[in-house]
Image (cartoon, rainbow, N blue to C red):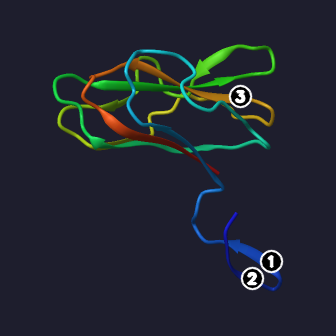
Amino acid sequence: MTISSAINGVPQRSGVNDMTLTWYLAKPHRVETEVGPVYRLDKNYSLVTAWVHTKTGPKDSNVQLDIRVEDALGVKTSIFTSGAYLTLGPPQKGAKDTRFAAIVLEEGNWVSLDIVSLDGTVGDMTIGLELE
């Protein structure tokens, strides 16, 4: 939490999210699961927004990304509503999404990134998941 001030000794939020999980892919080249780091949550969180930014946007087709949460039983669930993905379409270099499923992010859950579809022209891609 970022502290902006204190009122009667109680810290006040500055409007900055508690945590942003990030993935950097220099030159993604194929559809795959669990790309880059897999994060373990240190406490319970709520979803704020998911975003992607790339230096070179897709040329011919969409790039679709899924962020999944694995619970204590090993069940992996997409954070997005059914059929939705974080999508970057030609010629976009950035996109964000808040179409989240009714999912609870709990301490100890694992969070990973999947590439669902890919345009081979994309490079220097950074993906973020903002939590509070």
Q: CA distance from mark 2 to mark 1?
A: 5 Å
Q: Residues within 10 Å of mark 1 (few under 14, many from 20)?
A: few
Circle 2 residue: 6
Circle 1 residue: 10
Q: Nearer the viewer, residue 34 or 18?
A: 34
Q: Is residue 8 left or right of residue 65?
A: right
Element marked by disc 2: strand
Element marked by disc 3: strand
Mark nearer the N terminus (2 vs 3): 2
Q: Is residue 83 left or right of residue 90?
A: right
Residue in the image at 80% along x and 77% along y: 10
Circle 3 residue: 110
Mark 3 or mark 1, whichever is nearer to me: 3
Element marked by disc 1: strand
Is 62 above or below relative to 2? above
**Snapshot quadrant of residue 103:** top right
**Image quarter in which the N terminus is found:** bottom right
Q: CA distance from mark 2 to mark 3?
A: 33 Å
Q: Are marks 2 and 1 in contact (CB under 8 Å)?
A: yes
Q: Position of residue 110 (x, y in %)?
A: 71, 28
Q: Amino acid at mark 2?
A: Ala
Q: Amino acid at mark 3?
A: Trp
Is 94 above or below relative to 33? below
Mark 2 or mark 3, whichever is nearer to me: 3
Q: Residues within 10 Å of mark 3 (few under 14, many from 20)?
A: some
Q: Position of residue 47 (x, y in %)?
A: 58, 42
Mark nearer the N terminus (3 vs 1): 1
Q: Are marks 2 and 3 in contact (CB under 8 Å)?
A: no
Q: Position of residue 39 (x, y in %)?
A: 68, 35
Residue in the image at 37% along x and 21% along y: 29
